Image (spheres, rainbow, N blue to C red):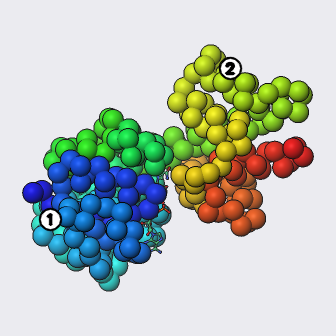
Amino acid sequence: MKKIGFIGLGNMGTPMAQNLIKAGYHLQVYNRTISKADELEQGSISKCKTPADAAANVAFVVSMLSEDEIVKEATSGTDGLLRTLQKGGVHISMSTISPETSEELAKLHEQAGSTYIACPVFGRPEAAAAKKLFVCTSGNAKAKEAARPILEALGQSVTDFGEAVGAANVLKVTGNFMIIGALELMAEAFTLAEKNGLDRVQVADFFGSTLFNAPIFHNYGRLIANKQYQPVGFKAKLGYKDARLALKLSQASQTPMPLATLAHNRLLTAVAKGDGEQDWVQAFGKGVSDDAGV
Ligand code: NAD
């Protein structure tokens, strides 16, 4: 049986790990709260006490952790995976993080004789469970080719953005900026329609099936129109992290992004009000409704 390391059993990591098990992999899993591993097929996993344990004696280790500092700690910290990953091993880093972090970690891997590739994904936990993620890759060509069967077990497509290791991270931050812009747009539009006597669900259905016929407008449109904020698929505090990543890139590259500033404030407000653990749809949907008094 093919054995790989898997680090991070959050909202995304758990269904992704389940798909790897379905594809025939045995997983050496690490999670901060290891009881999360109880949800996985027990015959197909070994529970590990550290990221280093998860990366021992395998050719591939996947990480799906929340943010930059956590991925760094799991990679190069005291119990980090770099301590044990074999020479020639590949770290498949799937979190939404900055391109700088990917560049930094890729260098550390290179010094250790292993390879780091960036493989962030689009799709919420339901999409992860249905193997419908869109996987985006960048980094060393040989490592990406070797990792392809693992990536194909996780999503509906794998799209490459070249050998510059941070490229897929730039793409992912760009895409999440487009999503948060669309969330604000829909929340404002549906609230405008509601306050002027229309049924916001009918409005969302009309636009989602005609002028704005695209997955983001179908899926998120329905949630925003129905004011449906449960279950939590993507936490507002992680959306806030992504808005910060977009602003950081915009500042570094001198790309003015007024819309990113607005969306950043919407997410910051949700976090400041104690709603960081709620879905980011709530940050936009409820944020706009509250402003409008409905
Ligand atoms: P989550 O909050 O559900 O899980 C986060 C994971 O990080 C967990 O395994 C948790 O144990 C670990 N973690 C958090 N803080 C830690 C710490 N201090 N020390 C050790 N481990 C720690 O997040 P998620 O929704 O699964 O997202 C994971 C990554 O995927 C994020 O980068 C997110 O932006 C990205 N992403 C999420 C979605 C989504 O819809 N949820 C979609 C695409 C990409």
Q: Residue visible at 77% across and 37% down?
A: 188
- Give the percent coordinates (x, y) of residue 202: 72, 24
Q: Quadrant of residue 40?
A: bottom left
Q: Quadrant of residue 110?
A: bottom left
State the residue position of label 1.
58
Extreme-left residue of the structure = 1
Q: Residue visible at 32% across and 83% down?
A: 78
Please state which amino acid type lies under the numbered disc 2.
Phe
Q: Is residue 267 left or right of residue 59?
A: right
User: With respect to residue 211, does 28 lie above or below?
Assistant: below
Please state which amino acid type lies under the numbered disc 1.
Val
Q: Nearer the viewer, residue 114 or 41?
A: 41
Judged by depth in the image, the label closer to the viewer, 2 or 1, is 2
Mark 1 packing: few (<14 Cα in 10 Å), some, or many (20+)? some
Q: Secondary structure at mark 2?
A: helix
Disc 2, ligand 1: is the CB inside 8 Å?
Answer: no
Q: Residue visible at 64% across and 34% down?
A: 222
Q: Nearer the viewer, residue 15 or 292?
A: 15
